[in-house]
Image (spheres, grey):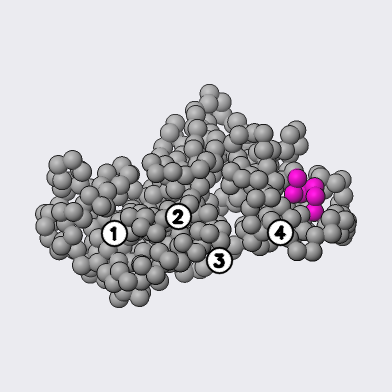
Amino acid sequence: MLFWADNDKILVGFGKELGVMYDYLIVGAGLYGAVFACEMKKAGKKCLVIERRNHIAGNVFTEEIEGIQVHRYGAHIFHTSDKEVWDYVNEFAEFNNYVNAPVAVYKDELYNLPFNMNTFSKMWGIKTPAQAKEMIARQIESLGISEPGNLEEQALSLVGTDVYEKLIKGYTEKQWGRSCKELPAFIIKRLPLRFVYDNNYFNDRYQGIPVGGYTKLVEKLLEGTEVLLDTDYFDYVKDHSKDVERVVFTGMIDEYFEHRLGYLEYRSVRFETEILEEENYQGNAVVNYTEREVPFTRIIEHKHFEFGKQPKTVISREYPQEWDPGKEPFYPINDEKNGKLYAEYEQLAKAEKNVIFGGRLGQYRYYDMDKVIRAALDAVRAEV
């Protein structure tokens, strides 16, 4: 992988001088851009990747602190049922056998997630699936909700009062920055209830964390590709628009079109990360705090993603917040209003014949990592 410094545009390593023609200018060095670049390099295409941040790997970026791979932008657990994608990522990294089994704290109570028999047993003192189903059904029936009019009613009609009040309401309101009564019902289409004693959060067949972190995986994907960091696309194309034939844009689609139809809405997250002089802070990688009164949504203890034994530990508290320009957009607000606005931008995007819009920002969609990789692989196949 070859890096250019932004301030003087000096190429470090053996690459190409500025002014050459590239088949693809790839905007963003996250998973979508890195996979696209990797596959196009295999196909004999010339690619240049530019990235506005000072590092590659986008939001899956990991950095070593005290010998621990820290997920700078929040927990990322790779999981998929797509064998082709699983085989693909294993070409570039070795994955450990980490299984995501978060726990939730509500006041002085501790529950297993996802909602399973361990959760129900702790909550109600019951033992069998039949008892749990009966309890939930009784609570749902007592509410008499036939047509849910908002997210709160939708959730109550799916899981009953206790699970909603203790494990969904506060967390969801912190995540969205709004009362559940103000959020549309369709945001929650279903809430998985598992009537088995199994704390594995995901149902996918394959799961794990890259040994040594995600940044190493992305470095492998970008090996042999020229990468220019600290570079804004809109500044770059002012002088280099004729250097490339096609653009792969993974930034915000509304920003690409200068917000001419209005701003799409996102939620952002603020992280507070600290090093602690102790070996083990919370005993689990992910602990959710579901009370509305607790300002953060969860605490991540990064060493547990790789079964670390370091003498110190690193934790990150996550504080959801409204997005505005200057902050990182983390996930789209896929309500009806934003859905309509995105559909309009999508029509503009279709008219851009030499631009491919990809990734969660380019397609205004909350993608899991495997879906990002799948979308990038599909986009490559459509090109070649």
Majority secondary structure of magenta residues: helix
Say which quarter of the image contains residue 293: top right
Label 3: few (<14), some or many (≥20) within 10 Å?
few
Q: Is residue 241 visible?
A: yes
User: Circle 3 is placed at which residue position?
Assistant: 81
Q: Is residue 377 above or below residue 26?
A: below
SS at mark 3 in the image: loop
SS at mark 1 in the image: strand
Of labels 2 and 1, the one closer to you: 2
User: Circle 1 is placed at which residue position?
Assistant: 26
Q: Nearer the viewer, residue 330 or 337?
A: 337
User: Circle 2 is placed at which residue position?
Assistant: 264
* Most distant residue in the front direction: 261
Q: Is residue 179 above or below residue 190?
A: above
The amino acid at mark 1 is: Ile
- Residue 149 badge: 4
SS at mark 4 in the image: loop
Labels 2 and 3: the sequence-earlier one: 3
Of labels 4 and 1, the one closer to you: 4
Distance of label 2 from label 4 (alpha carbons): 24 Å
For the magenta stretch, what is the residue range? 160-165
Labels 4 and 1: the sequence-earlier one: 1
Distance of label 2 from label 1 (alpha carbons): 22 Å
Distance of label 2 from label 3 (alpha carbons): 31 Å
Q: Is residue 211 visible?
A: no
